[in-house]
Image: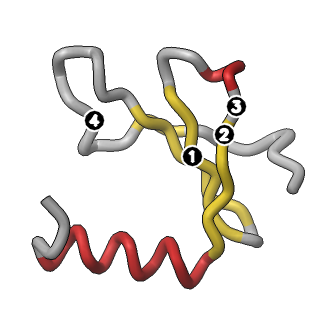
Amino acid sequence: MDHEGARWFKSSYSGGSGTECVEAAFTTVGTFVRDSERPSSGHFHVGRGAWAHFVGSVREGALH
């Protein structure tokens, strides 16, 4: 999966202590996720359906 040109943004759920920083980039094929403190260390891809399920679960409080 190509992430070149992806528009990365820091998650609003990232902690203020600087230790839980996550960035995401939405693409036509899904979402890329990486550590914002170490962006060159790699990223992973989550398909659109799986990402929608994850976000829905977070919103419902199903994940702690």
Quarter assignment of residue 27: bottom right
The amino acid marked with disc number 3 is: Gly
Identify residue for label 1. 33
Rounded to the nearest whole Å, what is the CA distance between mark 4 and mark 3?
A: 18 Å
Numbered disc 3: secondary structure: loop
C-beta proximity under 8 Å, tags 2 and 3: yes
Q: Residues within 10 Å of mark 2 (few under 14, many from 20)?
A: some
| Label at residue 43 | 2
Label 2: state its secondary structure: strand
- Which residue in the protein does label 4 denote? 14
> Which label's residue is closer to the chain start, 1 or 2?
1
Q: Residue at x 29, y 18 (%)?
A: 19
Q: Amino acid at mark 1?
A: Val
Residue 63 at x, y percent in the picture: 19, 66
Reading the image, the residue beneath label 3 is: 42
CA neighbours of label 3 inside 10 A, class few (<14), some (14 to 19), many (20+):
few
Point out the tag, 1 or 4, that comes first from the N-terminus. Answer: 4
Tell me whether circle 1 and circle 2 mark residues in contact (CB < 8 Å): yes
Q: Quadrant of residue 31?
A: bottom right
At a point 15% along the width and 75% down the height, the residue shown is 62
